[in-house]
Image (cartoon, helix red, strand yellow):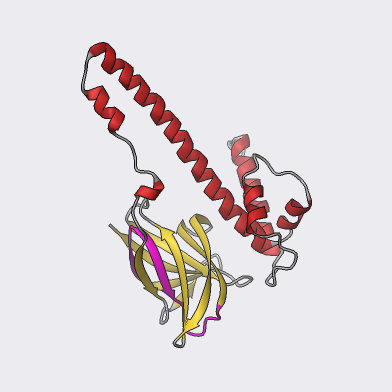
Amino acid sequence: MPDDSADEVFERLQDIVQQAILREFPNPERKGCPGTEVLRELANRPRPTRDAAWEHVTHCSPCYREFLDLREQVKRRLELEHRQVVRRRAVLGGIAVAIVGGGIAAYESFERREPAPEELGPYLPASLDLRDASSTRSAGGQTVAAKPHVLPAKRLDLTILLPIGSEPGRYDIQWLKDIDKPLLSVSGNASVENGVTVLRVKLDLSRETPGNYLIGLRQPPSDWTFYQVTLRS
């Protein structure tokens, strides 16, 4: 579009490339994959460096998906560190004002801070029963379940009972407001327990606003299936 900025054009092209890599290079047996530690080192680089590991990642959909998840974790950590630096500077400024003016309010602001991730509390057990979930096709060809489910807006140790007939193995999970715009992405391994295919993942929904969402599931290289979820406080 003529009104799009250069950054918007770049982001759109980057998204197209990422989706192509995630789609076009299935590697279900994970042949030649370098492992999580190597992917974590790649995710911590300020910018990609072309080497054998990066060449593999850009030609292996599972590794690239894991790399994106790790890079998102790095991004959140850097954002948290930045907020902490800004907060410390503001606190120091408040202390200086308190010393000059003798005010108590500035000192109280020194004690006031946001909780760090480890202080947010434990992951609470929750379940999502999709065994009898019926689904329909969306206009874009994606599958969207018709019946909504309910989850709390908490840090969840989530047990997902997959639809009848689901195979065990690795699954990708997305938490979305709109299709193709995931807010969270995780992966996990499903196993058969007492005749039911069970998938367990940790999902931090404590910062999400209550309302209607989608949870997407797929076992690569299959297509995504999306289920409607209502998030409640």
Q: Position of residue 100 (x, y in %)?
A: 27, 11
| 42 relative to 185 in the view: left or right | right
Q: Work out which quarter of the rendered image holds the C terminus and state it.
A: bottom left
The residue lying at 43 percent from left, 69 percent from top is 227
Q: Is residue 109 magenta?
A: no
Q: Establish if 100 lies above or below 232.
A: above
Viewer-nearest residue: 196 or 176: 196
Q: Establish if 112 lies above or below 31.
A: above
Q: Work out which quarter of the rendered image holds the N terminus and state it.
A: top right
The residue lying at 56 percent from left, 55 percent from top is 69
Viewer-nearest residue: 17 or 8: 17
Q: Which of the 4 image quadrants contains residue 189?
A: bottom right
Q: Position of residue 77 (x, y in %)?
A: 50, 43
Magenta-colored span = 149-168
Q: Which of the 4 image quadrants contains residue 214?
A: bottom left
Q: Give the mark count.
A: 0
| 151 relative to 42 in the view: left or right | left
Q: Establish if 222 lies above or below 89.
A: below
| 222 relative to 50 in the view: left or right | left
The residue lying at 54 percent from left, 49 percent from top is 72
